Amino acid sequence: MAIQNYITSLPTPILAVFGPLDVGVIVTYLALMALVGALAARRKTDARGYFLAERAMPAWAVALSVVATSLSVATFVGVPELSYTGDLSYLVMSIGGFIAVLIVGVLFIPRFYRAGTITIYGFLERRYGQTALIAVSCMFLIGRLLASGARLFIAAIPVCLLLFHAFDPSRGQLVLAICLIGALGTAYTVAGGIRAVIWTDSIQITIVVGAAILSIALLLHQIPLSPHQIIAALADPASGPHGAKLRLFDFSTNPTRPFTLWTALIGGTFLSTAAYGVDHDLAQRMLTARSALRGGLSLILSQLIGMLVVCLFLAIGLLLYIYYHRPDLMAAAAPTDPLRSSQQVYPQFLVNHLPTGLSGLAMAGMLAAAQGSLDSAINAMASSAVADLYWPIRRRLGKRVNAGAQAKAPRLAVAGMGAVLVLFAVLSALRYDPKKNTLIDFALGVMSFAYTGMLGVFLAALFTRRGNSTSVVIALIAGVVVTGLLQNGVSDWWTKKLTGHPQHLASFWWMPIGTCICFLICIAGRKTRKEKLATDGAVMHTDKTNRD
């Protein structure tokens, strides 16, 4: 009775799109997230336990959490758009992903475990000193705020369908949706820390996969063709912009194309290595496993699961191409609602063509995808702000980090980061231009600014004995500058000088070019005697902390 009364009190736009059963499913999902957060909050722990879950999480849950975070609504909405308007070439980026997880699992994660710090950036303190630690942490916080702000904005677009039945939402509607998603994700993350993040992520990715499978089954039922006929239509060389829509490998050497085999092998490897190896948002999850070996295995498992999930959403886009774009094949079963935009192709299907109850489950999957990337970003940023900035600065000022500060600081930092992230999402909503970017391009482009310099610094720290705090700071700044120049047309000018025809490099090439430059800048520095003493002190402090 209480749920029924709540449903009837909801705003009219919600009930105009969804029936009471749909809304009940969504409310049940939200209540489940709140319950998991409350259960995780019952376990009293210190800052290390709050941010690392006492390194006691099972590998399978860590893997599911990584998938939930890395996919987000950019996958839920953006990947069907890619296959609807293009082909399957996006899937080839998984090649770079597999190479990257092997590199990170074998070379990065064991070193992070041996460092024994709360965040992966503590490893850099042992190599380059506290100044480098603070600089890299600040770069991570800025980059993660921008990237997660973009993701949160992308999540708000389909959620506006739920709240306002708005396929082309106004800025005011987007801001309201952003605030709602941000408040929900922040609430249970504050309560339970990384433990709540991992368990809620595991539930959320299960719901996302269930919604995808449900959508595929319904599309196959509504399309009046046999599977063989569907495959034949998609294999038609005229069906895609560059050939058949089932084309997987693009062997083109054109650097303006985003999903070629060469961008996967080079650009995809660099981007995925940065995402899993130097971005604490994902790397933090591996540090919660019981050992470095299990952390590495969870990462490899997450890549396998993630590829299967991407395949599901690419299949949805292909079926939606038949459903909306081929009325000649649909005949009398063709939908009567005109497609508003390619970016809304999957949300529009969810709203208008799923039966009652199932539509609510699909929308719960969309909310789950939105919150799966939000909660982890908030927790990762808070852990870096506390362990890499707040505590070191307190020590520099001669103030002790007592038990009271350790208990209060993590939750206050999570709440603060949640609020700031919402602000950046609003700014992303104001900056985004749908005429210039797809949702996937927009999300990936934002990430490159921070990743470029950070990956160059980590590679220098892991594989050389060179570099100092000054060269680290210069490399980080260079990463932002180089990425900004590449994104804003310096490649057009350079290629015009060489060939007479301007070519704008695809975003996947920014990382390899920028990272190589930043790596060379970082290793150009040599440690002074003072820096050697400082890093030796950092090693002794970390070892003492681990023993305690």
Image: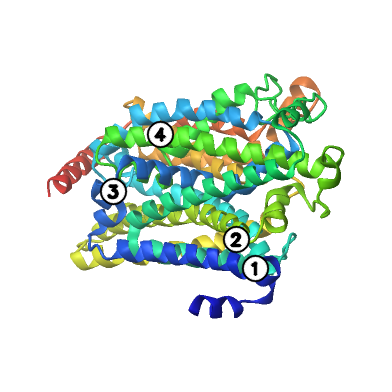
Which mark sits nearer the N-terminus, 4 or 1?
Answer: 1
Tags 1 and 2 touching, CB below 8 Å: yes
Which residue lies under the disc numbered 1?
19
Near mark 1 (Cα within 10 A), the count class, few <14, some 14-19 or many ≥20, is: some
Left or right placement of residue 230 versus residue 457 in this view: right
Disc nearest the viewer among 3 and 2: 2
As drawn, 315 above or below 335: above
Seen from the viewer's position, the closer of residues 460 and 207 is: 207
Q: Amino acid at mark 4?
A: Leu
Q: Nearer the viewer, mark 4 or mark 1?
A: 1
| Pointer 2 residue | 357
Disc assigned to residue 43: none
Q: Quadrant of residue 61?
A: top left
Q: Earlier in the sequence, mark 3 or mark 1?
A: 1
Whichever of callouts 1 and 2 sits on the residue coming sooner in the sequence is 1
Query: Which is nearer the eye, 2 or 513?
Result: 2
Comes first in the chain, label 3 or label 4 = 3
Give the labeled residue for mark 3. Answer: 118
Viewer-side residue, 277 vs 360: 360
Q: Is residue 360 above or below residue 254?
A: below
**Mark 3 touching mark 1, by CB under 8 A?**
no
**Secondary structure of residue under mark 1:** loop
459 to the left or right of 446: left
Residue carrying label 4:
301
Q: Amino acid at mark 2?
A: Gly
